[in-house]
Amino acid sequence: KYVHEEHTVSLSLPVMESPALAPPELSQRESYHVFCSYSNTDYDWTHALIQQLEDKGLRVCDHERDFTAGRPILENMTESIEQSQKVMLVLSAEFLRSRWCLLEANMSMFRDCLVHLELYLLLRLPDRIHHTLMLAGQRWLMMCFFTLCLFLFNLFLTLLL
């Protein structure tokens, strides 16, 4: 599922189409409906989106608020992704430059291969395409291509099983 928004923040998930629908139940092992991975440069935009999701009753894991202080970051990442029904990656040029963001993306895609975790990719593009984004374009395209390949591979495996 892919969403691109520049100025407004909106996400059309089945749970959000009608105010009468309640968020999905969390199992005993789940603490969150969504784990959100984003670059700190996209903080304002992402937090507006997180607020919208939480206003609809969804529990969103935000590393700034929900990671346990003093605990190794890898343990926080792993546990939070494992305790989430879905993962939302806010892809931007800065996301692709961040080793932590790429690690969260890789951990999420690995988990998707194991348990069919749903990944939501939001493409966060600036108002104008800057020269730095053009320089990062090849890496950006490779990440999108890699994600598409994983999706098609998972679909292929699902059809075989």
Image (spheres, rainbow, N blue to C red):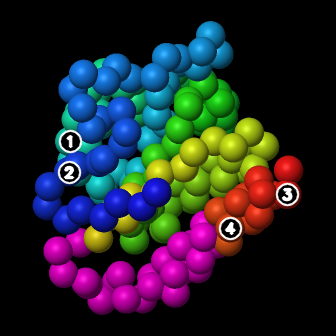
Q: Nearer the viewer, mark 1 or mark 2?
A: 2
- Secondary structure, magenta segment, majority class: helix
Circle nearer the N terminus (4, 2): 2
Q: How many marks?
A: 4
Magenta highlight range: 126-148
Q: Is residue 98 visible?
A: yes
Residue that carries the numbered disc 1 in the rendered image:
48
Residue that carries the numbered disc 3 in the rendered image:
160
Q: Residue at x 21, y 26 (%)?
A: 19
Circle nearer the N terminus (4, 3): 4
- Between 84 and 126, the one lying in front of the other is 84
Q: Secondary structure at mark 1?
A: helix
Magenta residue check for 64? no
Q: Specify the farthest residue to the left.
A: 7
Amino acid on which the number 2 mark rests in the picture: Val
Q: Position of residue 120 (x, y in %)?
A: 47, 51
Q: Are marks 4 and 2 in contact (CB under 8 Å)?
A: no
Q: Position of residue 142 (x, y in %)?
A: 58, 79
Circle nearer the N terminus (1, 2): 2
Q: Nearer the viewer, mark 4 or mark 3?
A: 3
Q: Residue at x 78, y 43 (%)?
A: 114
Residue that carries the numbered disc 4 in the rendered image:
152
Mark 4 → mark 3, Cα distance in angstroms: 12 Å
Q: Residue at x 24, y 32 (%)?
A: 18
Amino acid on which the number 3 mark rests in the picture: Leu
Would residue 131 appear left or right of 97 to someone viewing this image? left
Q: Are marks 1 and 3 in contact (CB under 8 Å)?
A: no
Mark 3 → mark 2, Cα distance in angstroms: 37 Å
Q: Nearer the viewer, mark 4 or mark 1?
A: 4
